[in-house]
Amino acid sequence: MSAGRQAALGWIGLGKMGYPICTNLAKAGFPLAVYDIDPARGTSLAASHGVTAAASLADVARDADIVFSMVPDDAALKAVALGPDGVLACMARGAIFVDLSTVSPEASVEVGEEAARLGIRYVCAPVSGSTALAETASLTVLASGADAAFHDAEPAFAAFSRQCHYVGDGHQARYMKLAINHLVGSTAVLVAEALTLGRKGGLDWSTMLTVLGESVAASPLVKYKLEPLRRRDFTAAFSAAQMLKDMTLVAGAGAAAGVDMPAAILVRDRFASYATGDDAGKDFFAIVEDVEASASLPPLDGSETH
């Protein structure tokens, strides 16, 4: 990358998070080529923000200084990154591959080893935050990898994040993201159980939420979820199915690392029993409905939620 020149970027994955992130990168003026398995997403972004809609992984990777990927899971990351037609094989030696997905440490190590073999600099950079924060360029980046590669990618991170934490020179960012998501998923289950107990004890739903929001237990996550809970609006910002996937990663990472994590296993199993059928697509805080049903509480109607 030449000094003073804005890096040419490639982007793989235009889902709920990837699309607004790319919008912010385009607004920041980065030369940007994008690819998604649904070509319409790239075409849409090209029409609205002037990016290049690439037809293949090779087209994204060939001329990019930095290629980013944001994909659903381990299998998708390996499909994108590895093999003779994968993005790593198509990148120039010395270029940077940054993966922002939430994946297992094992999958990350596999990709990192192949990147090193091919002379590609690899940065793990999962993000923390909602789609709303992605839209306002307010995500938190959790990054690890070679220090110089991280610093070369920092200007791009700054275009879509409010905070960027460098946590180590290896795969530490994967563990940081899983640790955070363990707390997030567990909070949803704890809040669901606490609110169900309150309903059983005769507390008014709205009053209970107001007091919770002013209590010592009111974390930023809890405060963010109070209004949707008040309205019983479980439109997914992050779905129950996605949380099941992440809690499965958390429990798996604990087992691989030799960490006894019974709480993580309980939370994973609770989401496994809930995140089926139509419920899988609801927001993960909708697990309160499952806890209420198991306590034989009827659904709340509109008059009880205000």
Image: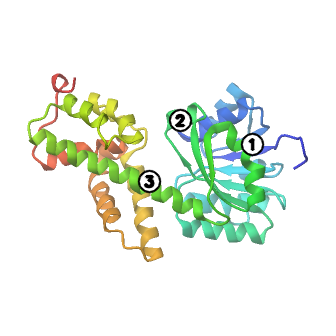
Vertical placement of residue 92 versus 117, above or below: above
Near-viewer residue (275 or 136)? 136
Q: Which residue corresponds to the image point at 57% horizontal and 57% vertical from the top-left?
A: 76
Vertical placement of residue 224 versus 3, above or below: above
- Any mark on residue 181, and which? 3
Q: Name the residue under label 1.
A: 155
For residue 240, side relative to residue 51 (left or right): left
Classify 10 Å Cα crowding around label 3: few (below 14), some (14-19), many (20 and above). some
3 or 1: tag closer to the N-terminus: 1
Q: Can residue 54 be seen in this view?
A: no
- Any mark on residue 133, and which? 2
Near-viewer residue (264 or 275)? 264
Vertical placement of residue 101 versus 219, above or below: below
Kind of residue sitting beneath label 2: Leu
3 or 2: tag closer to the N-terminus: 2
Q: In the figure, residue 270 lies in which quadrant? A: bottom left
For residue 70, side relative to residue 234 (left or right): right
